[in-house]
Amino acid sequence: MGADLAIKNLHVNVEGQEILKGLNFEMNRGQVHAIMGPNGSGKSTLANTLMGHPAYEVTAGEIWFKGENLVGLTADARARLGLFLAFQYPSSIPGVSVANFLRTAINARHEQADGGDNGNGQPRGISMRDFRKLLKEKMAMLQMDPSFARRYLNEGFSGGEKKRMEILQMALLQPEIAILDETDSGLDIDALRIVSEGVNELMSPNLGVLVITHYQRILNYISPEYVHILLGGRIVMTGGPELALQLEERGYDWVKEAVNK
Ligand code: ADP
Ligand code: MG
């Protein structure tokens, strides 16, 4: 058996330019990995490619998850398999409330391949009562005011509220691999702590978390067992938590020299 998520020789073009150039990476559920890299190194490109964003063209390589090569699958098929991405820049959807959005997302995530109904001609899905209970519980965990659920998705949300919203979505969708792209950006220290505690609370043998970040800061709260450095379109170095501290102290230049880039 291979790793739960295995990326092999991934090459990705964005707007005709090659950004990922033969990236290899593996992780399992139950683990926390961090991928760190300078700005513009392709961290978000990797995150968006994993999720199946159509602007990111895979020109070679494979992404194995639960026995399937994800390349070519739509983002919603990937989400149904149990992959989740917390965006660096979440979009707003005026007119769609947080509660409606989340209930729709839960039902879509757990939708049966046969599109079956519940026997009464109604689509299968979470009942309103169960949904409200779950939402209330997870919002409390993230210290979100209940009135939040009635607001339009991300409309007028602060940076911290948007990131909390992403983690709330993760809590409800119960993915098997969650990718957090720069979840620390735009967060003050209190919000960072709340968001990180939320993620830590969700950790289980069934969940793997991939933290993608430029700065070491979030790794003080969400502790990775493995730290990888993305540079020149590839993972060029892998180590333990000490590698993140080294980057914090010394920046990325010594890595460039060490790998001769
Ligand atoms: P990081 O997240 O590490 O800062 P990105 O993956 O966002 O890096 O960007 C890597 C490179 O790809 C940059 O040169 C960036 O300009 C380019 N790029 C990424 N996404 C897009 C896009 N949607 N359109 C055009 N260029 C992009
Ligand atoms: Mg980015």
Image: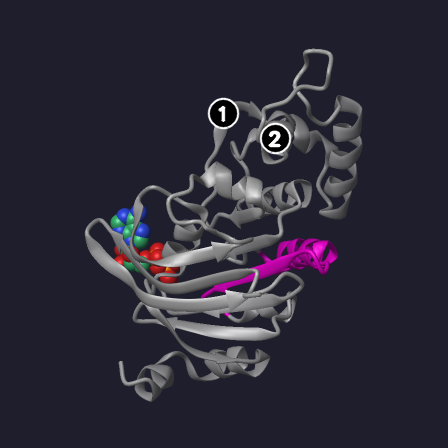
Asked which colour scheme the image uses, the reply is one colour
The residue singled out by tag 1 in the image is 94
- Horizontal arrangement in the rendering, residue 30 relative to residue 41 (left or right): right
Q: Name the residue at 64% across, 54% down.
A: 191
Q: Is residue 223 left or right of residue 11?
A: right
Q: Is residue 37 left or right of residue 98?
A: left
Point 71% across, 54% down: residue = 202
Which is nearer the N-term, disc 1 or disc 2?
Answer: 1
- Where residue 119 appears, as percent x and y from the top left, is 73, 15
Magenta run includes residue 174: no
Q: Which region shows up in magenta? A: 188-215
Note whether 62 is above or below 22 in the view shown.
Answer: above
Q: Quadrant of the C terminus?
A: bottom left
Residue type, label 2: Glu
- Give the vertical position of 236 relative to 66 (above or below): below
Residue drawn where x is 63% and y is 66% of the image: 31
Quadrant in the picture for residue 232 = bottom left
Label 1, residues with CA under 10 Å away: few <14, some 14-19, many ≥20:
few
Left or right of 96? Residue 39 is left
**Residue denoted by label 2:** 111
